[in-house]
Image (spheres, rainbow, N blue to C red):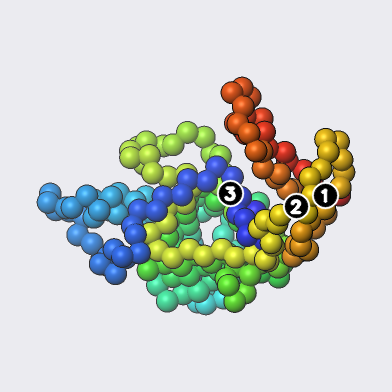
């Protein structure tokens, strides 16, 4: 779920396989049959073998909205279990919300999410190829503060090692461009004075922008204890509060 500057993806596996400096060296049609492939090419080939174009059950045939049948080769909107392919030079706008769990999504073109409505995509594996683009809000058009932009990676059981012997699937494999932007929130602000345990008020040194009821705040601890669990902030003596 994307709201403000944060993105929360269920069971996200984000694999940044290629740096920006190497991006320009990649070509779309690699020879994956040779014995002398360099490690980067070999890894790229393993990834793309997960989402072969020939196995796509839905292919975007025109720029347009995801939820219009005329956008797709079958004349129907993708449904659960399908393999979806967005070719080069095609831009698809994801302008709705669906619980249909797509099997895989390959992006050679561009997939961009609407920023003025709630959106939700459920999928098991996303592969963004070297020339592909995935945009969930941009600096010029961020997701508005009253809406959420959500990608949920579905749990369809253990990895099928016959299909995926290298265990690369289940999540997002990002080889192209990714951008996510939400409404601005002041990331941190100093307190004007201390506060006592049990107090329900904080006095801040300046007025934060974009903070709303329901937002979580962290008051950072100033000592480090030797006991407590990291996952519930006890070890750092941090305090997590909710604005009411």
When asked about the image quadrant of residue 53, the answer is bottom left
The residue lying at 63 percent from left, 24 percent from top is 228
Reading the image, the residue beneath label 2 is: 191
* CB atoms of marks 1 and 3 within 8 Å: no
* CB atoms of marks 2 and 3 within 8 Å: no
When asked about the image quadrant of residue 185, the answer is bottom right
Disc 1 from disc 3: Cα separation? 31 Å
Task: Residue 10: give x, y in percent of width and height.
Answer: 59, 45
* CB atoms of marks 1 and 2 within 8 Å: yes
The residue lying at 23 percent from left, 55 percent from top is 41
Left or right side of 196 for 71: left
Pointer 3: residues within 10 angstroms few (<14), some, or many (20+)?
some
Q: Of callouts 1 and 3, which one flags the residue occurring earlier in the amino acid sequence?
A: 3
Which label lies toward us, 1 or 3? 1
Reading the image, the residue beneath label 1 is: 202
Task: Residue 153: give x, y in percent of width and height.
Answer: 56, 47
């Amino acid at each position: 779920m994307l709201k403000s500057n944060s993105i929360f993806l269920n069971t996200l596996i984000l694999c940044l396989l290629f740096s920006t400096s190497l991006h320009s060296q990649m070509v779309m049609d690699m020879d994956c049959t040779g014995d002398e492939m360099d490690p980067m090419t070999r890894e790229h080939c393993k990834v793309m073998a997960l989402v072969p174009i020939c196995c796509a059950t839905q292919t975007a045939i025109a720029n347009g909205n995801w939820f219009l049948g005329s956008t797709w080769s079958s004349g129907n909107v993708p449904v659960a279990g399908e393999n979806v392919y967005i070719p080069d030079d095609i831009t698809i706008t994801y302008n709705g919300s669906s619980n249909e769990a797509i099997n895989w999504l390959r992006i050679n073109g561009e997939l961009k999410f609407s920023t003025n409505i709630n959106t939700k995509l459920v999928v098991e594996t996303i592969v963004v190829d070297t020339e592909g683009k995935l945009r969930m809000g941009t600096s010029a058009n961020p997701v508005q503060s009253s809406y959420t932009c959500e990608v949920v990676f579905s749990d369809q059981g253990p990895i099928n090692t016959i299909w995926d012997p290298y265990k690369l699937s289940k999540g997002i494999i990002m080889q192209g461009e990714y951008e996510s932007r939400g409404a601005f929130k002041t990331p941190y602000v100093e307190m004007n004075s201390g506060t006592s345990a049990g107090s329900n008020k904080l006095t801040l040194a300046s007025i934060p922008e974009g903070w709303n009821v329901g937002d979580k705040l962290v008051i950072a601890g100033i000592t480090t204890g030797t006991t407590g669990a990291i996952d519930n902030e006890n070890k750092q003596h941090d305090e997590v509060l909710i604005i009411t």
